[in-house]
Image (cartoon, grey):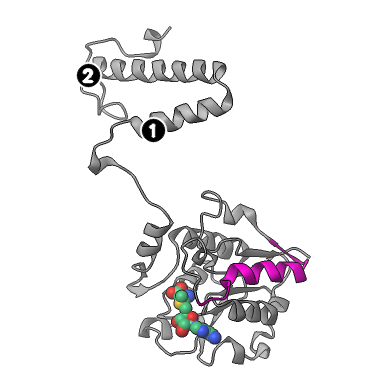
Amino acid sequence: MISTCLPQAGLPMPAGRLGRYENSEAFAEYSLGKIKSLEMKKILKKFLPDKLFIIYRFLKKQLRFVSKDKQVHFDTNSVYTGHLKVTYRGIQAIKCPFDYVIYQMIISEMKPDLVIDIGTNKGGGALYMADLMDTIGHGFIHTIDIKNQRAEIVSRHSRVKFFTEGWQNYNLNEARGFSKILIIEDGSHTYEDTIGALRKFSPLVTYGSYFIVEDGVVNELAKEKGLNGGPLRAVDEFLKENKGFVVDRAYCDMFGKNATFNVNGYLKKVK
Ligand SMILES: C[S@@+](CC[C@H](N)C(=O)[O-])C[C@H]1O[C@@H](n2cnc3c(N)ncnc32)[C@H](O)[C@@H]1O
């Protein structure tokens, strides 16, 4: 049975997908090994209770020898360190890599008329979204900070308008005339600022759109000191007072349970 799906031993391997095996014997050996381990896995799965099987898999992984240069290891702390080094078109863009992908999906699917982006910093995040909007040919960004530290290239983007008096002084009339509005809160991350911004800007969020609260991960990273509970406390409180929003688990859990820096932070307007 097995031999029928393998090339005849000793024959040279055709170039292409299997060409990395020196010859058909090497490939046969590899395939048999794979099949045996799959069969073993099936047998163990059948006879071991679920929990024991999970322990078996865990131990197998731990005991497997992997040379140091081939090991894979990353966690929330290493992603945090890395995300501070991320640039977009050379401009610092402080977001978790998973979230760039999610932002891209939301902007392409929703095609917002306006994104209100609280916390410009150097403007890498705003530039990324503005370029995405260029590719779909739709949308504008109002980006707000308390300092003017944005890079020149961001200042010149025709889809971006800057506000430097903080979210507290943004005049909501600026959003008049836009129908599909998406809000991103990436400011100081204190509980007070986050809940304040949620209360001020959430009425602008249109049905099916999002209020994205960034950096609830500070609690997981034990960096919430001085933030008075930070974004997570604000989100919990906001959701109790606002039944029109739910946490979109599809985005929060796309790469693993809350594998995002916006922990429980993709708030979708559902009614
Ligand atoms: C984490 S950085 C923003 C990163 C940026 N969104 C990006 O993608 O690169 C936080 C920014 O929030 C700004 N900030 C602090 N308080 C603010 C407020 N009240 N209104 C608007 N921005 C504020 C800070 O000056 C800082 O530049």
Which of the two marks, 1 or 2, is nearer to us in this view?
1
- Which residue does the numbered mark 1 point to in the structure image? 61
Viewer-side residue, 21 vs 71: 71
| Residue 87 within the segment the image draws in magenta | no
Marks 1 and 2, the one that precedes in the sequence: 2
Whether residue 253 is visible here, answered yes or no, is: yes
| Residue 229 within the segment the image draws in magenta | yes
265, above or below 42, in the image = below
**Amino acid type, label 1:** Lys
- Residue sitting at 29 percent across and 16 percent down? 29
Q: Write down the quadrant of residue 265 in the picture.
A: bottom right
Viewer-side residue, 265 vs 157: 265
Whether residue 210 is visible here, answered yes or no, is: no
68, above or below 74, in the image = above
Q: Give the range drawn in magenta.
A: 226-246
Q: Whole-Å distance between the Cαs marked 1 and 2?
A: 29 Å
- Residue sitting at 26 percent across and 27 percent down? 19
Is ligand 1 within 8 Å of the beta carbon of the residue shown at mark 1? no
The location of residue 114, given as percent across then percent down, is 61, 77
- Which residue does the numbered mark 2 point to in the structure image? 23
Quarter placement of the C terminus: bottom right
At mark 2, the secondary structure is loop
Q: Give the numbered dot on residue 198.
A: none
